[in-house]
Amino acid sequence: MAKKTGDNGIVLTEAQKRARRSRSIAIAVALAALVILFYVITLVKGPGVLVRPI
Amino acid sequence: MSLVSEGADFSVTSGSVYAEPGLAEPSLATVGDYIALLKPRVMSLVVFTALTGLAVAPSHIHPLIGFTAILCIAVGAGAAGALNMWYDADIDALMTRTARRPVPMGRIQPGEALAFGVTLAAFSVMTLGLLVNWLAAVLLAFTVFFYAVIYTAWLKRWTAQNIVIGGAAGALPPVIGWAAATGSVSLEPLLLFLLIFIWTPPHFWALALYKSDDYERAGVPMLPVVAGEVEARKQILLYTLLLAPLGVAPWLLGYAGALYGATAIVTGAIMLALAWQVYRERSPEERAGKRLFAFSILYLFLLFAVLLIERGWGGLLIRWAV
């Protein structure tokens, strides 16, 4: 259980820190993968990236 | 609106400073909890049927664009699952099959599940539209909307036909896959849609037969609960009588080869035999229901797998195999 202490604000427990760290890493990995995906697809599609048929 | 989403206290805050209004307990949710929100088992079937739709389509699609399409469909399906778990947290907590899901367990707060689902839904639809095509994106958006709003928020708690109509959401992935590859929709993907659509009722009613206590406790009007087990058994048999010939139809219409035809005939006959056993069974243990439920998954998997092998990427797999 996290605690609220005087000047230090909210102090996370070790379990909460571990959970937050694992979520942060997952978000970073997902964002990096998306950046790479968009970049490579832009290369693959070339000028066709601007063509959007419905 | 689900009871949980209206702010039920999961008691994790009791005794801490976060019990004060406006303070939320820092989350203990792990990455695994968020993955569980995506319903990975359902997602695997969605990915497989969408891949089949994409691979049997006559158009060539760049492998990376195809991968992106499948990724977006998978994430969209996961988003629909997360929204379902957000809305249904109250009834999930009452059923043995779903009680250990992250929201009823209190590992993920309802608002977090909602935000996660909405974000993934928007992102998957926009990415599919921008990187693949907008017809596929519109179909994906409709699928997520249909599952999260029409099925989950409306039909599921209202009518015994919930999974019949709601089955449309689960049946759309091969159509989205086809649309991603071709930019259009034709009779062949609609046949695959119809196959999953008709497969859904006997599949879920077989489960509902031996989980009817769960559904009754949660107040979900599944057919065995509302109309009785005898009627449910009859409906299972009737839908399977429709399903078996429909499974053979892609071969009869020339969309699939002899291997698919033989597989569809044999597995369709087994489905019929199991549905007949369900119809005749009066045992409270519901052995026949469990067998039909398990085999129905294998049935759908086999039909799509054979179609993928025979027709996928212009028959590439079968040429490679022989």
Image (spheres, coloured by chain):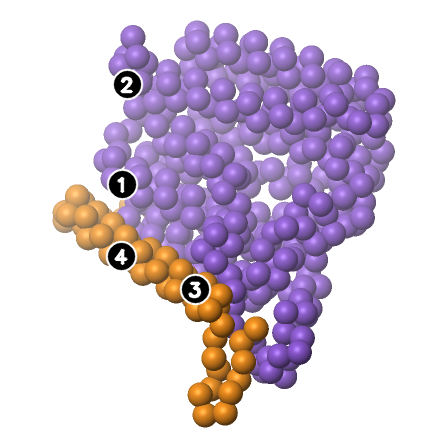
Mark 4, residue position: A32
What kind of element bears circle 2? helix
Mark 2, residue position: B316
Residue B34 vs residue B189, the one in the foreground = B34
Q: Is residue A31 above or below residue A4?
A: above
- Left/right placement of residue B181 relative to residue A19 reads left
Q: Are tags 4 and 1 found on a single chain? A: no
User: Label 4, label 2: how many angstroms apart (C-alpha)?
Assistant: 33 Å
The percent position of residue A52, horizontal first and vertical second, equals 27, 49
The percent position of residue B210, horizontal first and vertical second, equals 76, 33
- The amino acid at mark 1 is Ile
User: What colour has chain B?
Assistant: purple
The orange-coloured chain is labelled A
What kind of element bears circle 4? helix
What kind of element bears circle 1? helix
Mark 3, residue position: A18
- The amino acid at mark 2 is Leu
At label 4, counting other C-alpha atoms closer than 10 Å, the crowd grade (few under 14, some 14-19, many 20 or more) is few
At label 2, counting other C-alpha atoms closer than 10 Å, the crowd grade (few under 14, some 14-19, many 20 or more) is some
The chain under label 1 reads B
- The amino acid at mark 3 is Arg
Q: Residue at x 49, y 20 (%)?
A: B303
Mark 1, residue position: B65
**Camera-nearest label, 4 or 1:** 4
